[in-house]
Amino acid sequence: MVITSRNGHVLRLFKTPKNVQKLVRQISQKDYQNKRVNIEYGKELKKAGLGNKQANVQGTPPRTTLVNSAADVARLDYLPRSTFYGSQRKETYGCQMNVNDVEIASSILKKSGFVMTKTEEDADVILLATCSIRETAETKIWNRCMVTRLKEKIFQKSKDVDIICGPDSYKDLPRLLHQSNDSGQNVGCDNMCTYCIVPFTRGRERSRPIASILEEVKILSDQGIKEITLLGQNVNSYRDMSEATSYGGFDPKSPTKLSSADFKTVYKTKLGGRRFSELLDRVSAVNPEIRIRFTSPHPKDFPLEVIQIIKERNNICNQIHLPAQSGSSRVLEAMGRGYTRQAYIDLAYKIQHEIPGVALSSDFIAGFCGEQLSDHLETLSLIEKIKYHFIYSFAYSMREKTRAHHRLTDDIPQEIKNKRVSQIVETFRAETLKLLSQNTGSHQLVLIEGESRRSMHDLVGKNDAGTKVILRGDEIPSEFHSNTERFIKPGDYVVAQIMGCTSQVLKGVPLYHTTLQDFYYWKENRRENINAFG
């Protein structure tokens, strides 16, 4: 099986019998360019013993990046395990939601006997998964979000697409490869922002039980994983209602809390359930050597207890994604975001005050319906004021079924949208270069991820803020002031001295190996020892 993007970049490859391999070769680059994907070849596959359908699988992830338990998978009507063999390869393109989709799908299929191949030529099934929240993504691939709202159009366009499934059907993938089934339920968002199609493609918010998440974190900890990202459409609105008689210390009638009285919702206050603060507390306590990140939150769901737990736990990264979307109160109201410019600024300042050195990132949409030049300038001034470590910026694209599609007019020319995106990026890069320059000379904890793409002699990792750090792959002391040395490898925590930067990357010199807890112990209690090294 190949999980790939429209332009042919491979995400996941799975291998099945040789008498099926020739079918994949019929999928040419021209097919991709013509926005067609041939993945069925029903009669031939049926002769090969794989049933009469193959799948174009799209879906949305659960509340976190953690995959579902394999217990349910074991009860499925699998294809014969003896027919699958081969090796594997991994490349990932797209946002973290897309990465999560691929991880879930491939994990479940491998549990059922599928294995990954090294090349497309050796694979027989192609699964496509990406995002269609914005039009640019939809033009690249017929993706998971799009299929739920354009299902009939897809079937009319390409008779080769026979199976479409959503997030709750992931565990059903092995059986879906054997028989046709296009049903699936979606999860998503309750906020109803006017520009966003998520509520119509992924449905209402739903949270995984804390117990299942903790079980999976423990498994990942035992496997030596060093970083886990909790992932959800609105991850900090997490509310586990799975236990009927216990709500984790919250009274069943206890209302959820917003960031402040200046934030509003389109829905009634929700009652009961285990909240995001408890999830962070319990996940971070499993293994203090595992970094915990989360994305993507909504600004309205940052009560003080969430901010406090981030501040108190060294292994919860001081990195918070705080999507603004616009710096103009007038545009924010048209977007249905539930807050004003000033309410957002007050929240950002509150977080920066409570968590010194916190790294904020954000999303911005340029050219939303009715956006005037003065609105755009307010967005630029917000970027200068908050000083983000990273931003994502996009030109607005009208999506069918959204409230904006029914009530507003997409009246900003594309060339102006593109120009405003460029100005947002330019403003951000100027500010972040100043911000990252302040790191020069500092000692930072870096989790090594692998080799740098630009030099086989350099390694790349990330600091607590999520900023990339490039450093040499040298032998360094195995711990602070140790006489023994060892080479740096992926998964190692190292202390690096920052020597310079660009607007996106820090450049450092590795000093010594460490652990996450040791680093913060020395930083907080023996600061003079850290500064004295080297």
Image (spheres, helix red, strand yellow):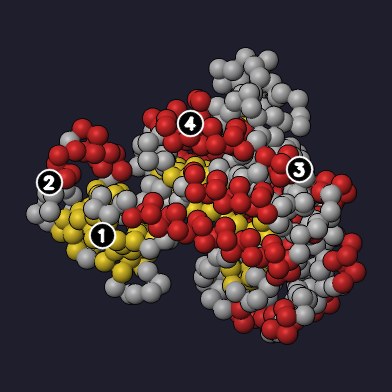
Distance from Cα at disc 4 to Cα at disc 1: 30 Å
- Mark 1 or mark 3: which comes first in sequence? 3
Task: Provide residue 353's location: percent of width, then percent of height.
Answer: 42, 32
Q: Nearer the viewer, residue 484 or 501?
A: 501
Q: Are marks 1 and 3 in contact (CB under 8 Å)?
A: no
x 60%, y 57%: residue = 393
Q: Residue 76 at what x, y percent from top left?
A: 71, 52
Disc 4 from disc 2: Cα separation: 33 Å
Q: Residues within 10 Å of mark 3 (few under 14, many from 20)?
A: many
Q: What residue sits right under mark 1 in the picture?
A: 499
Q: Residue at x 43, y 54 (%)?
A: 432
Q: Nearer the viewer, mark 4 or mark 2?
A: 4
In the rendered image, residue 330, in percent from the top left (x then y), is placed at 71, 41
What type is the residue that disc 2 sits on?
Ala
Asked whether the residues under the numbered discs 4 and 2 touch, taking CB atoms below 8 Å apart as contact, a structural biologist would say no
Residue 248 lies in quadrant: top right
User: Which tag is nearer the camera, tag 2 or tag 3?
Assistant: 3
Cα–Cα span, label 1 and label 3: 45 Å
**In the rendered image of this protein, does residue 122 appear above or below residue 426?**
below
Q: Earlier in the sequence, mark 2 or mark 3?
A: 3
Marks 2 and 3 sit apart, C-alpha to C-alpha, by 54 Å
Residue 399, numbered circle: none
Q: Amino acid at mark 4?
A: Lys
Mark 2 is surrounded, within 10 Å at the Cα level, by few (under 14), some (14 to 19) or many (20 or more) other residues, namely: few
Q: Tell me which numbered mark, 4 or 1, is placed earlier along the sequence.
A: 4
Q: Dot 4, crowdedness within 10 Å: few (<14), some or many (≥20)?
A: few
The numbered mark at residue 350 is 4
Q: Residues within 10 Å of mark 1 (few under 14, many from 20)?
A: some
| Image coordinates for residue 517, horizontal then vertical, percent | 29, 39
What residue is shown at x 67% (from left), y 49% (from top)? 375
- Where does label 3 land, which residue? 334
